[in-house]
Amino acid sequence: MTTISELTMQAEPCTYIIFGATGNLSRIKLMPALYHLDVENRLPEGTRIVALGRRDWDQAQWLSEVRDMIKTKIGQDFDEKVFQRFSAKLTYHRGDILKAECYSELNATISQDHYPKNMAFYLSISPAEFGEVIGYLSAEGLFKQDQGWRRIIIEKPFGYDLESANALQKRISRYVSEEQIYRIDHYLGKDTVQNVLVFRFANLMMEPLWNRNYIDHIQITHSEELGISTRGGYYDTAGALRDMVQSHLLQLLTLVAMEPPVSMEAESLRDEKVKVLKSIRSIPKEAVHAHAFRAQYAAGQIHGKSVNGYLQEDGIPANSVTETYAAIKLYIDNWRWRGIPFYLRTGKRMTKSQSIISICFRHPPQHLFHDTQIQTLNPNWVLLGIQPDECIRIEMTAKEPGLEMRTRTSSLDANYRQGNEKSTDAYENLLLDVLKGDRSLFLRFDEVEYAWRIVDPILQTWAVERDHISTYPAGSWGPAESSRLFDKESQYWRSSLTPECK
């Protein structure tokens, strides 16, 4: 999707400084994304990439590691000639980011003439280190914009709850302005997520139906086959609600529910998203159990192979009640959506890895067919496949061929990507937007703040309820008890892009 702001923005050469460059995110996402941008000639001439890490590597070792990162990611598409061009942009800087001398040495390096004075600092580090690192950078004068722009990219999570998010914002705002901060949610960089906006606002036929008069409810589901892998230490302090719902799923909700922005410029777009978050009805603590459900995966089978339950994973305490499944029900109290439930759910070790937005329309009037053999009319659905199936699907009822009045569900499909079109990684879009200064797909602090306000009562209630947590077998679609969130008996979790009859 090309935004209006992109039409007037050009990527400028800059010095990209990546903190935590030897870590997992850099290995599987950042370095391959930067390489792909260079393959497509999207990195401006003169751009330099400085990798900052603690490991005792020299430049040759770093280039060897980056080659392995990219080869592992893209396989046979690796081009040695392109890599040689790309590697000329790379510099390894060894240092301990919690020591002041690291920053004076870094400043001496990037002050050399062949490093562009536009600078982007990517903090691929622990959230607990954000404030300290930003303070050190400021002490070296590296946020001054007298010779070029300075931008800082912060990975989620931004805070642990509402209080810590506000404290972090207060701390870093002493050193940088809001315009310099790029809070990254990689979900917003996905082409299919951006396509939600195009589907809504570039197709006039849907707009008259996109409201409480025609829509029964909306579901947003993100499921994963994987467990927590080696992330036990992080995950047990976070849980599914913080890890996915507060960030990714609430962002998808804003795109589905927002009003048309005045333009596609960054601030207009983000203003409308914030309006949605501010309109979400708060959940009193005494009503948490009517609006939220949590569970934890137990032992089960994935693709016929036995897998451990959450409590058997490495680094997980035997008495942990951290949720690996979270489902919540929200209402948006505005003219368009008042009274319509939005159901959000996410879980690990589920049947299939996928992300789907499912819009269920109201039931048609059954009495029109009371003299026919039609027993039940299924509602119409609009299904937006985010991953791995990238599509838009509209389910409609049609008559079966034959002499009798029988119906079946047919679907109108619009595949997002044609056979010869390659996918673009979300980080490619976002890293390039930083160079352009396009903040459309990055989070403003008020977005972060109001998202925390929504989930905070749930987190506080769950934090003190430590005696019991429901379970679901690995390889299932989650706990059946979560269906108690539904407003009507006719509502059910939509788990497939293929027609379902209930």
Image: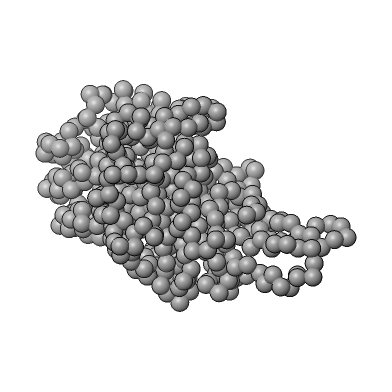
Q: What's the residue at 19%, 32% (across, down)?
A: 95
Q: Nearer the viewer, residue 85 or 3?
A: 3
Among the 4 quarters of the image, the one containing residue 20: top left
Render colour scheme: one colour
Relative to 149, say whether 16 is above or below.
above
Which residue in the rendered view is the most extreme toward the right? 403
Q: Is residue 420 left or right of residue 222?
A: right
Q: Nearer the viewer, residue 485 or 138?
A: 485
Q: What's the residue at 18%, 37% (across, down)?
A: 97
Relative to 221, say whether 49 is above or below.
above
Q: Is residue 165 left or right of residue 483?
A: left
Relative to 340, say whether 327 is above or below.
above
Q: Is residue 212 left or right of residue 331?
A: right
- Mark yes or no: residue 459 visible: yes
Among the 4 quarters of the image, the one containing residue 270: bottom left
Which residue in the rendered view is the most extreme toward the bottom? 335
**Residue 131 at x, y = what percent?**
18, 48
Q: What's the residue at 23%, 55% (across, down)?
A: 165
Count the marks.
0
Which residue in the rendered view is the most extreme toward the front? 467
Q: Nearer the viewer, residue 475 or 131?
A: 475
- Mark yes or no: residue 81 visible: no
Q: Is residue 382 left or right of residue 271?
A: right
Q: Quadrant of the C terminus?
A: bottom right
**Residue 34 at x, y = what percent?**
40, 40
Among the 4 quarters of the image, the one containing residue 92: top left
Relative to 180, say whether 88 is above or below.
above
**Residue 337 at x, y = what percent?**
47, 71
**Residue 439 at x, y = what percent?**
36, 58
Q: What's the residue at 85%, 61% (across, down)?
A: 404
